[in-house]
Amino acid sequence: MACTLAALWAGAARCAPLERELHVVVTVDAEQSWSKDDPKYPGHQWSKATSRQRWELKTRLRSDGKLQVRDLLDPDLNTRMEAKTIFLARQAKALFEQSGKPFKIPHTDAEKSALMQEMQEQIMGCKGQETCTHDMTLQYAALMAAIEFPEALEEDTVPGQYLYFLPFKGCADESRVTVDMAIDGERYNKDVDHLVQFSEHRSADTVNASDGLALCEHFAAVIDTKEPKKLVRQENIFIPRPEGTTDYTERGHTSHRQEPQPLIGAAMNWVNDTLRHAPESGNASATLPLPMSLNGNSTWLGLWQGTAKVSLQWTFSNVAPTAVAAPPK
């Protein structure tokens, strides 16, 4: 049976593998002021700041079509951790069996020590390659879970209702993050013992930033086929941090640096909260307070005030499955 929406919410026992694309677009328009009056320093320190940011990402997730008994993203922490422990333990068992290795849970201290040694050797064999290290760590973490909770490997005896959408090898993804930030004001400079004017400009336009993992590795989604409102749970909306330039001018001197640029934390938190349990597609907007510095540097203390106008559009839609590359001959 094809995994159509009608089939899912009609209670199909199992569907064919399904692939979906998550597409998220966020725009942020922020303004902020800073002020500080300290009797230890002469004069009124202040700044005005603006920031325009746009975040767009697309990534694919895949379901094997099997309806699971537990919600992998249940809002209750204990229930969620139990579901993840059981799922990871079963994944580890399947991986070991696919590789032809016997899946034997160690019981004695010597067996556990041997397993730890094997894990360390295999992770060292990755030679720092992020994806390999990630996969090996996940595999052995799941095996450790199976050791602690052997009942996790027992088959379920009740029908499932949750469809997991997870990362997969070769997942198609793309992202683009742009930042344009300007700050102007006056602050105390201890070298000259008086107020000086300063300006700061930050910019970035980064395509397909990577932390060494595929973008899809940062995501997971769950569909509850018995959910009356047909909502989707998202674990996390990961926005790659862009690399860009920072120009800071004070007392006639300008420094120029290439560095990661800050994203607006309040907007990121709101996007995650909005999509944690949301329809398959939609849009939303909000005006958020900004009590922390836009440039990520709040060491100057003082009072930060401002707002960020945020708009969000998203879809989590069915797509044709990604073709699997044929193994080399």
Image (cartoon, grey):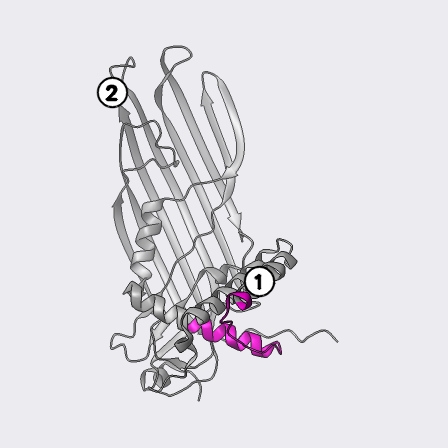
In the rendered image, the vertical position of residue 17 relative to residue 138, given as above or below: below
**Quadrant for the N terminus in the image:** bottom left
Image position, residue 144 (x, y; %)? 47, 66
In the visual, does 112 lie left or right of 80?
Answer: right
Under tag 2, what secondary structure?
loop
Q: Alpha carbon of mark 2 to alpha carbon of mark 1: how far?
A: 57 Å
Q: Which mark is residue 229?
A: none
Residue at which label 2 appears: 37
Residue under the image location 51 percent in, 36 percent down? 245
Front one among 154 and 164: 154
In the rendered image, the vertical position of residue 48 relative to residue 263, given as above or below: above
| Figure quadrant of residue 196 | top left
Residue at which label 1 appears: 119
> Was residue 72 drawn as part of the magenta stretch in this picture?
no
Q: Amino acid at mark 2?
A: Asp
Q: Which comes sooner in the sequence, label 2 or label 1?
A: 2
Image position, residue 295 (x, y; %)? 39, 35
Q: Mark 2 or mark 1, which is nearer to you?
A: 1
Residue under the image location 36 percent in, 81 percent down? 5
Image position, residue 329 (x, y; %)? 75, 76
Front one among 283 and 64: 64
Front one among 80 and 259: 80
